Amino acid sequence: MPNTMNAYHFVDATLRNGQPVPPDGEWLEYDGPMPLIMCKRGLHASLHPFDALQYAPGPILCRVEVGGEIVQGEDKLVATRRRIIRRVDATDLC
C-alpha cells in the first residue's frame, strides 16, 4: 500500500467526533488505539466521491490526501493521517 494516496471525504460544520474541521492543508492525525478498524477506528475516506457520498454527514465534499498506515476496503479506506486538499459545497451539484 502506498505511503499516501488521494481520496474523497464529506464533512459538515464539525467532524463526527465534534472536533472542528481542520483548515485545508493541515494534517489530522489519528492517535487512538491500534490496529485501524474500518468503521470504528481511524480516519476514513473513499477513492470515489460517489462511494464517499453514502457516508456523508454533511454537504461539503473534500478532496483529501491520506497517509501513514492505510487499510483499504471495498468502498472506503481508513488511515492514520488525512488532510484536506480542496473542498466544495456539493449541495447544488445534483
Image (spheres, grey):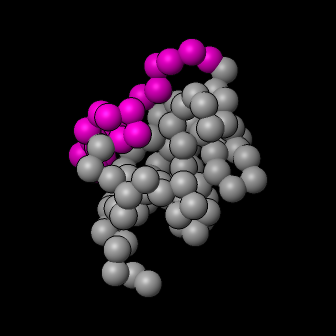
User: Residue 18, located in which quarter of the rendered image?
Assistant: top left
Q: Which residues are magenta?
A: 15-34
The reply to whether residue 69 is in sight is no
In the orientation shown, which residue stands out farthest toward the top?
A: 33
The prevailing secondary structure element of the residues shown in magenta is loop
User: Residue 50, located in which quarter of the rendered image?
Assistant: bottom right
Is residue 49 part of the magenta span, yes or no?
no
At x 34% / y 81%, what residue is drawn?
A: 92
Q: From what the image shows, is residue 20 above or below residue 60?
A: above
The reply to whether residue 92 is in sight is yes
Is residue 20 part of the magenta span, yes or no?
yes
Quarter of the figure that contains the N terminus: top right
In the orientation shown, which residue stands out farthest toward the right?
A: 74
At x 26% / y 50%, what residue is drawn?
A: 13
At x 31% / y 69%, what residue is drawn?
A: 89
Q: Position of residue 6 (x, y in %)?
A: 52, 55
User: Left of 61 or right of it: where is 20?
Assistant: left
Q: Position of residue 69 (x, y in %)?
A: 61, 31
At x 54% / y 43%, what residue is drawn?
A: 44
Camera-nearest residue between 68 and 75? 75
Q: Position of residue 74 (x, y in %)?
A: 75, 53
Q: Position of residue 53 (x, y in %)?
A: 53, 64
Please count the marks in the image: 0
User: Residue 55, located in which quarter of the rendered image?
Assistant: bottom right
Quarter of the figure that contains the C terminus: bottom left
Camera-nearest residue between 33 and 85? 33
User: Left of 39 or right of it: where is 14?
Assistant: left
